[in-house]
Image (spheres, rainbow, N blue to C red):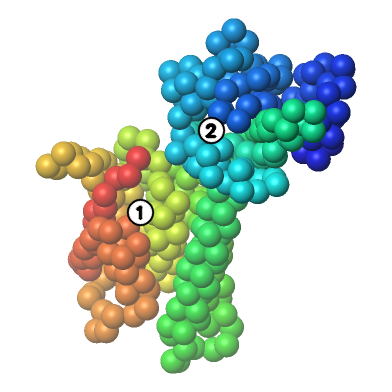
Amino acid sequence: MNLEDLYRLLRSEHVQAQGIVDTLEEPLLVLDQSGCVLTANRGFYETFRVARDDTVGRSLFDLGDGQWDIPELRRLVGEIIPRSTAVVGYEVKADFPTIGPRIMLVSARRLVHPDNNSTSILILFEDVTDTRHSEAQKDILLAETRHRMKNLLAIIRSLANQTDVEGRSAKEYRDAFMGRLQAVAEAETLALAGSAEADLGVLVEQSLKAAGPERYRLIAGPAVRLSPRQVVPMSLILHELVTNAWKYGAFSNSGGLVHLSWRTSQEQGKSFLHIDWREENGPPVTPPTRSGFGSRLIDLSAVQGLRGAVELKYEPTGLKVHITAPAES
């Protein structure tokens, strides 16, 4: 039953009109010319948790503790309705004492009784609070998805453009690029999962699993949950460290070993994460003569991605890396 049907029903003053109106779930009011409530349906009483004796015969704007004294509703009743045949879907936001903040779509129409030329106002309320919140969440999710896709494409473009090609075969370039791309894909999966899988320990073990447990020593610190913004840069850092260890470091020797640990600290009321990577029993290490994309990617991921810092030490006994970043969990 729409507003037009209700108008015809009440205008006819049918004896069963009130009973039919009471079957409507949507809250409904009928006001006189001065704004006093002539009648209300059961949906109104149940939705707004008010009693009939506290409603009928009183001005709409005096109901309850003045919960209906809403500027938008005053404007609707006092200005819009007298000048219009009908108003449909007029949005009203208010904080009702009994039910909290709600968003209502108000539809109204004048009821003219031909026998006495009196005018009543029929008002129908539709609670769209949950619908509006759901739409807002969808908008946020869509915006976040677009932002993620934009960032992901930028990362892939950067990987493709900056992965070294000089002195490499097509297969070597492909393997290097695809390895980094796989790390990004796995990190995005963790970030989108939004579950306990985004734990730092899970990400560390995932990055090291190919080496086998006998090739690394893990000293796990406290549980640290990574925010979605942290997962990708952290995954890229770990991927580059593991890749470098396979190519030049501890994993390239049968007896090589990687030590990885983390801890948290409190400094000036803020929490910080500290990660240490140390290699031993690998080939002798010397500082590189130039900065490759791998080391630049580690630095960019730590500084811009994690909002932290990274220190790489190329010591003869093996590479040492210390990463510091704000702890967001």
Residue position for label 2: 102
Q: Quadrant of residue 321?
A: bottom left
Left or right of 135 in this view: 298: left
What is the quadrant of the N terminus in the image? Answer: top right
**If you read the primary sequence from the N terminus, does the residue marked by circle 2 or circle 1 appear first?**
2
Left or right of 109 in this view: 36: left
Residue occupying the point 41% across, 66% down: 240
- Residue 258 is labelled as 1
192 over 123 or under it: above or below: below
Residue occupying the point 77% across, 31% down: 113
Left or right of 54 in this view: 19: right
Looking at this view, is 202 or 73 the one in front? Answer: 73
Q: Quadrant of residue 139?
A: bottom right
Looking at this view, is 88 or 310 the one in front? Answer: 88
Question: Residue farthest to the left?
Answer: 268
Image marks 2 and 1: residues in contact by CB distance under 8 Å: no
Looking at this view, is 162 or 28 the one in front? Answer: 28
